[in-house]
Structures are given as C-alpha cells and as structure tokens.
Image (cartoon, rainbow, N blue to C red):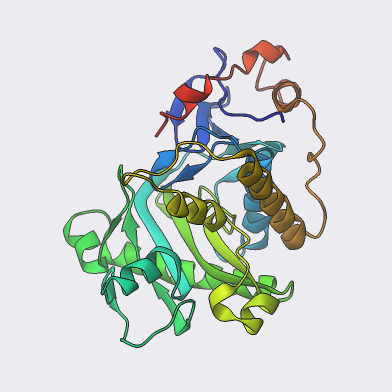
Amino acid sequence: MNTLTHFASPQLPLLHRGKVRDSLRAPSGDRLIIVTDRLSAFDSVLETAIPHKGAVLNGLANFWFDKTSHIIPNHVLKLVDANAMLVKEAQPIKVEMVVRQYLTGSMWRGYQAGQRTFSGVTVPDGLTKNQAFPQPIVTPTTKEESDREITPENLVSEGWVSRELYEQMKEKSLALFRVGSELLAEKDIILVDTKYEFGLLNGELILIDEMHTPDSSRFWSAEDYARNPETAEQMDKEYVRQWLIANKKDDRYPRALTPEVTQEATRRYLDIYERIVGEPLPTADSEDVRARLVANLAAAGLLKNAVVSEATDLPVDEAAKIL
C-alpha cells in the first residue's frame, strides 16, 4: 500500500527531519510540516511505514488545535494537505509535558521494577496495572536524543525553563488534558495519558507539534476498561510497542513489523480517527499520497510546479536511520 516515508524538494529548504515529521521552509518564511507514515518506538524509527498514519496524525492534531484554541494559542496557520500543515515559526521549548491519569505503559513497567518516584511525583505502593490516579499527574521529560525524566526543580536549575514558565506550561497542560478527557468521554474513549509541547512566539507561550493523537497519547475503550481495567483495548501506538517487547531477541527490538501487525496498526489509526472526529479519514482511499501532496502544495502556492518527482522517497533503510 502507498506510504509516505520522506518528503524533499529543492524548492523547500529542509529545516529538520524528525522521527515522524519533515520540516521545510515555506516561501513565506513560515514552517511547512510534512507528517510522514514513519513509525517511531523506543527512540528508533522502524523500517516499516504505516499506511495512512501521517494523515491520521495531522488530521487529529488539526482537530484538537481547533478545539482548544480558547485555552492557548497554537502554531497552526492552515492545513495544506492531509499530510501537511503550514505553521508559525516558534522557538520550541525542549520539554515534553507528560500528563498521566492512569498507571500504565512505561510508568507501569518502572513501577513493577520498584520505581515509585517519576519526574518528582511519588506514588504509593500497592497500586495495580491501569489503576487511575485521584488526579492527573504531570511527569515532564527533556527533549534530547533520548527523552529523560526530570523534576520541575531540575528543569529550572538546568536552565530548560524558568519556574514561572514551567508553572504556566503545567497549568495549560492540565487544562488541555481536562478538555480532551471530557470530549473523549462523550465518545466512550478514555484519554489515559498524553504529552504536550510548547514554544514561544514573540514571548508568548503557544502550543506546537501535535496533541491527542495515537502517537502522543494513549486511548482506551471506556467499555473495555469498565469490564476489566487490566485488559482494556489499546487504540494507539502502544499496540506496536507491546508487539516489539514480545518479540525482543538478544536485548534488541525488531526493526520491522510483520504484514499482519502493520495492517492491524493501520486499522487502529483509522479507527481512532473516525471515533474522535466522527467521520472516516477523507483520504483513506487515496492511491498516490505523494502525487496528491505535491498537487496540494502547488495549489497552495508552496511549489511552483506540481511535479510528483518533487516528493522523493528515501529507501526504507535510509528512512529507518532518521532520528
């Protein structure tokens, strides 16, 4: 199936190639973010791309940015294509604000190993897998080559943010989490945990990157959770993480997914999009992602000519090296 693993054009200078997103300089001076179908897990980009994943992430991010603009401004200028977003150029804050409502995922794995303090937040003994906390907790990490748990005090002492800025980020993160949780609850979905990223634009704090997507968040079926909290259905990237953990050999995770796992991952991405937005992904039947992307970039005045060769794909082994 057609996937977008990389985008490049001599007309659009490359600013940054992340694990999933390619950032390019638009003619206007703004930033053009291309959300690819690459999949990252455990700080590594897998060789296998997930069909429609980029469009799902981009569409959901745009949906949530629109729903939460009353809480905090964001960087979105316009959605150019299902896989592309034109955004304002902000100074990114190298901190991920992780908000958790349940003991699960990496935190549960650490808890099982005896850890009780996470980014300065201490939780009691005797908790069970997927148990809810009385209130959401914030466990920030640094954005480095490998994300690192860090306390708010160390964020300030190491110079990542000021105390005032951290408190503002925390307040906004909890407000965003509250709105997301309430909206998803109406759709019988639990927002388990998520991360938010912020930037500064003319000295003002704004929301950047993505929000409440299957890559940045964990979702459960409320019905499944009520039936059995420890086996609640995972509607997010944790499905792939668990498969990688189960198939780890010689202390190394697999570099590629099986066709069956890839297909199931695609199903989950498309399903969570439809559940949240209320309608299927508009481009789910798109036959040529790159041709559509280039045509839309040209229509938006970001490319001079709609030539498919403008969107060149890296070989899979090269895309897998991207960090």
Q: In the rendered view, does 237 fall on the left or right side of 67?
A: left
The vertical placement of 291 against 51, above or below, is: above
Q: Is residue 146 above or below residue 70?
A: above
Residue sitting at x 82%, y 37%: 285
Which image quadrant for residue 177?
bottom right
Quarter of the C terminus within the rendering = top left
**Residue 321, x across and y down, in percent:** 41, 28
Question: Which sits in the foreground, 30 or 110?
Answer: 110
Q: Is 18 on the left-hand or right-hand side of 113?
A: right
Single out the residue that lies furthest toward the left: 157
Q: In the picture, which quadrant includes the N terminus?
A: top right
Location of residue 233 with respect to 320 vertically, above or below: below
State the image quarter where residue 308 is shown: top right
Residue 139 locus on image (x, y percent): 35, 68
Q: Is residue 231 visible?
A: yes
Figure disc tally: 0
Residue name at image x 41 percent, y 49 percent: 200
| Front residue of 123 and 182 | 123
Q: Is residue 13 above or below residue 75?
A: above
Quadrant hosting residue 8: top right
> In terms of depth relative to the viewer, which is nearer, 26 or 187?
187
Q: Position of residue 24 (x, y in %)?
A: 52, 27
* Residue 205 visible at all: no
